[in-house]
Image (cartoon, helix red, strand yellow):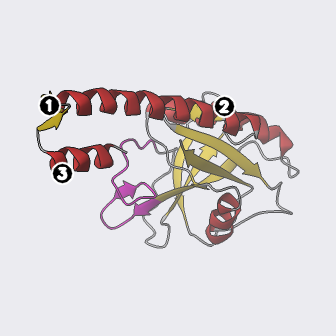
Amino acid sequence: MKIILFLIFVALGPNLIFAGKYVNNTRIIEVLGSKVDNLEHALRHINIRMLKYHSKCDVQYEDHCFFSIFVGGHGSRMNQAAAKLACEKFDARPANIYSKKHLEMILEYIRPWISARDDGGVGTAFKTGMIYDPKAKIVYLSDGSIAPYVRWGSGFPNPDVKRTVIIVNVFPTGSSGNGMANHNPTTTHVGLLCEINV
């Protein structure tokens, strides 16, 4: 919308003659831009409320909504390709982790799923959309930009060059295993974290 306002400004020039008087287009564009900002903010708020209503915003962090897909224990698991398709069914994508606070919110959100495991395990792992480059030792967000925050769980990252997919390991509070881990894209896990930008 702001691009359209800019193009109108460029097309009309800084001033416009209206009813025989000069009108300053710069001020008009500033006021319209402010109104557009207010409208965009209101639409984001409505969108978040709708996503929460449809259980697609279990965790909200900044302008992102997150929800999980839990497929069960050892009997039901998914690899990275299946995880991507599962999120896309809900118009979402496998999630990113953006900060320490965000990771803590996700750990608290996922922790109740530990008791839902059917194999008696003490932790669980949820797939994300993040990628690890083992040679460069860099974690990337799903859009290809460098991850602003990484916290490895104990024993990670694994140096195996095939382990390029980032998962979130979730254990009881205080465990050194809580955090990120790198796995092979074909490795299957019980859960998936999806993200929708609002």
The answer to whether 171 appears left or right of 97 in the picture is: right
Q: Earlier in the sequence, mark 2 or mark 1?
A: 1
Q: Please tell me whether mark 2 or mark 1 is closer to you in this view.
A: 1
Give me the residue at 85% from left, 43% from top.
116
Give me the residue at 61% from left, 46% from top.
169
> Which quadrant would residue 111 be assigned to in this image?
top right
Give the Cα distance between marks 2 and 3.
38 Å
What amino acid type is highlighted by mark number 2? Arg
What x and y, as percent, mark residue 144? Answer: 37, 60
Secondary structure found at label 3: helix
Magenta range is: 131-151
Q: Nearer the viewer, residue 19 or 170?
A: 19
Q: Nearer the viewer, residue 166 or 16?
A: 16
What x and y, as percent, mark residue 105? Answer: 58, 30
Secondary structure found at label 2: helix
Q: Nearer the viewer, residue 123 or 102?
A: 102
What amino acid type is highlighted by mark number 1? Gly
Q: Please tell me whether mark 2 or mark 3 is closer to you in this view.
A: 3
184 up-or-down from 68: above or below: below
- Residue assigned mark 3: 11
126 up-or-down from 144: above or below: above
